[in-house]
Image (tube, rainbow, N blue to C red):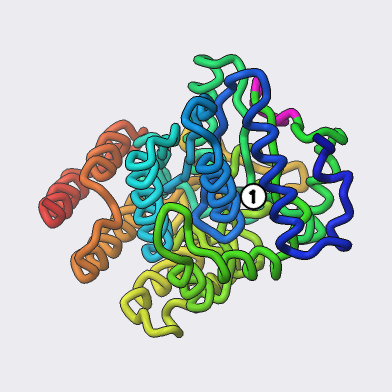
């Protein structure tokens, strides 16, 4: 079949363009090998459309031709915006249930960061200052590593996997440049960081309006419609943080746009999506927004930072700028105390007991070990979440 990007979508109606994409998905699925597919699913409009079209394509095939396994993989950083992560969980459950009922070779998986790499273990346990544009330690640890580990596991079993992404050229100038940079003129492009992974971007030529027009006019093939998704965007006034599997994608996370993402995100100046939820009537998220703003406020306060880094060294840049070390133990304790207070009021888990135990372990290994009063306070706080 001709490659999709050889066609000029401007001359096609939306129905014709979608039909062309569906045909290409089927053509790629029926290639003479059984390399599994992995769909990077963020729960947003673009990845939802990719999952929709793949699901729909499978339904067109007789069972004897549904040989290739498809993994729909999402990522939960454990500090996702509450409404967004609930939408992801609900939609993944719907997809999995429908796939079982229809006997489709679809596996759903939500990846999460290792206990040692969660946001709170790093901020409260190790004292990392909350991320900024120059020290964005969160994306790799919380998003890239968990999803990449899942993909690598599939590569080890199958030698090659094909990663389907809801990347579109018209998203932004940055995205267009990224697509062009990694475009080899073929349907499948080699993944920059994952050997054995080929990338397939089936909706790369669609516009934002076309994505929304299609989703609004069509029900989900796994059941229901997309009214909740549309309302989620309307309430937040933003867009999703995509599934990230390579550092070159990182600018999409923590950009200046109103993207869904971590409610703790301090890379952006203002969390416009969380503000949008609060403005739309979800007043219970106000304390989360205030807490996030407080993390930004204290990040560069020298009184809250240790003089030395965790390895005991003092850092001075080539320009003579002194870089303070991690948060002081007192500040870490205060962050934990405030967080657990909000958790009690919210009646939903913001930090797990396992994370608190890991934080306690890290504190005990500090060169300057926590005092008895520190340890007693931690024990008291742990009891609050039991």
23 shown above or below 227: above
Q: Quadrant of residue 330?
A: bottom left
Q: Quadrant of residue 194?
A: top right
Q: Nearer the viewer, residue 377 or 306?
A: 377
Q: Nearer the viewer, residue 228 or 312?
A: 228
**Image: magenta residue range:** 190-196
Q: Residue at x 47, y 75 (%)?
A: 231
Image side of residue 193 versus residue 189, left or right? left
| Quadrant assignment for the N terminus | top right
Image side of residue 241 versus residue 104, left or right? right
Which SS type dominates the magenta stretch? loop
Q: Residue at x 48, y 35 (%)?
A: 71
Q: Residue at x 23, y 66 (%)?
A: 341
What residue would you read off at disc 1?
A: 166
Q: How many marks?
A: 1
Residue 227 screen position, x and y as percent: 46, 72
């Amino acid at each position: 079949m001709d490659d999709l990007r050889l066609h000029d979508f401007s001359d096609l109606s939306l129905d014709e363009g979608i039909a062309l994409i569906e045909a290409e998905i089927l053509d790629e699925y029926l290639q003479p090998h059984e390399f599994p597919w992995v769909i990077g699913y963020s729960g947003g409009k673009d990845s939802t459309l990719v999952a929709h079209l793949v699901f729909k394509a499978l339904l067109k095939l007789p069972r004897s031709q549904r040989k290739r396994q498809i993994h729909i993989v999402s990522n939960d950083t454990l500090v996702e915006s509450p409404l967004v992560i609930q939408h992801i969980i609900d939609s993944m459950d719907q997809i999995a249930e429908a796939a079982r009922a229809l006997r489709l070779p679809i596996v759903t998986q939500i990846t999460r960061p290792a206990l040692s790499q969660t946001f709170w273990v790093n901020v409260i346990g190790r004292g990392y200052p909350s991320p900024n544009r120059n020290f964005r330690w969160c994306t790799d640890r919380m998003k890239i590593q968990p999803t990449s580990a899942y993909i690598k596991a599939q590569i080890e079993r199958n030698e090659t996997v094909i990663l389907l992404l809801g990347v579109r050229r018209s998203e932004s100038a940055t995205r267009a440049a990224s697509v062009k940079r990694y475009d080899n003129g073929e349907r499948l492009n080699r993944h920059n960081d994952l050997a054995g992974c080929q990338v397939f971007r089936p909706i790369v030529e669609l516009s934002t309006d076309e994505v929304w027009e299609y989703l609004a006019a069509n029900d989900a093939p796994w059941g229901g419609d997309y009214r909740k998704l549309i309302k989620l965007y309307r309430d937040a006034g933003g867009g999703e943080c995509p599934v990230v599997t390579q550092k070159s994608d990182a600018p999409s996370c923590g950009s200046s746009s109103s993207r869904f993402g971590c409610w703790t995100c301090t890379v952006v100046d203002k969390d416009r999506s969380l503000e949008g939820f609060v403005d739309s009537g979800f007043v219970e998220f106000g304390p989360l927004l205030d807490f996030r703003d407080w993390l930004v406020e204290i990040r560069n306060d020298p009184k809250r930072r240790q003089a030395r880094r965790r390895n005991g060294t003092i850092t001075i840049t080539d320009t003579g700028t002194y870089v303070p070390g991690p948060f002081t133990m007192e500040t870490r304790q205060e962050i934990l105390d405030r967080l657990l207070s909000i958790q009690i009021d919210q009646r939903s888990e913001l930090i797990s007991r396992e994370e608190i135990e890991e934080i306690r372990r890290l504190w005990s290994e500090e060169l300057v070990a926590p005092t008895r009063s520190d340890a007693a306070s931690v024990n008291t706080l742990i009891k609050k979440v039991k």
